Image: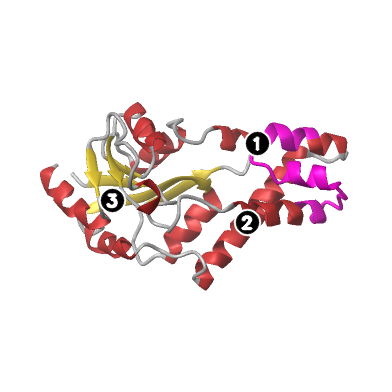
Amino acid sequence: MTETILLDMDGVVLEGPGTPQPVYDRAADAAAAELGLEPTDRQRADLRSHGYETVESTCSTLDADPREFWRRKEAAASRLAAERIRSGERGIYEDVAALESLAERASLALVSNNRHETARYVADFLPVPFADARGRDPTPEGFERRKPDPHLLRETLEELGTEAGLYVGDRETDVVAAERVGLESAYLRRSHNANAALPEGATYELERLDELDDVFEKR
């Protein structure tokens, strides 16, 4: 039976724990311009926020469709994220190279709280034959189903036709989501979580992705 290894993206494959706020700021400004909105400084700050309720309230004040604004903001953020990766502004961890040989023995997939379009882009950008890549839908509902909600992991497992495997992440929410779908979890140390407590329930603790070879042999 082919082993299944799912990996988080931000902080595991892509350098840094997540998309920086300036990307979302630019994305919100782009969405507002596309819709012809003229927000005040306070309204612009609210449109740049992460939470949908704030965006919904502000769009209502501006007589704009909040779901359409959200969709355009997510699309713009994905375009900006791709540009940063292509240019090298956002790097790839060098130990990701270890996944190329691991893919010869295991089915690999990216599962991220980041946008689905960005997860797909990264999977295609890297020289790793990922069997699937999944991120959040560009909708308010998709935003609410981020980990530790197990929705994304469950969908990926269904797509791959399996119920077992390992999930590699850098946050406690990754460990919780893995546990909720019956997966083992590997907590990967990076500079941003080097001193964090090991999440309760983590099956393995890794310092580098290269160590997945040893985990693979033990399973």
Question: Which residue is drawn at the image coordinates 34% and 62% (left, top)?
Answer: 128
The residue lying at 66 percent from left, 56 percent from top is 76
- Callout 3: helix, strand or loop? strand
Q: Residues within 10 Å of mark 1 (few under 14, many from 20)?
A: few
Please name which of the two marks, 1 or 3, marks the residue nearer to the observer: 1
Magenta stretch encompasses residue 19? no
- Residue 215: image location, x then y, percent: 17, 47
Disc 2 element? helix
Report the colour scheme: secondary structure
Q: Which residue occupies the foreground of this view, 149 or 90?
A: 90
Q: How far apart in space, not on screen, are marks 1 and 3 (Cα)?
A: 34 Å
Quick check: is 40 in the magenta stretch?
Answer: yes
Sequence-wise first label, 1 or 3: 1
- In percent of width and height, residue 85 lies at 51, 66
Give the residue type at disc 3.
Answer: Ser
Q: Is residue 90 left or right of residue 216?
A: right
| Location of mark 3 (residue) | 107
Q: Are marks 2 and 3 in contact (CB under 8 Å)?
A: no
Q: Which residues are magenta?
A: 31-57
Q: Quadrant of the N terminus?
A: top left
Q: Nearer the viewer, residue 43 or 119?
A: 43
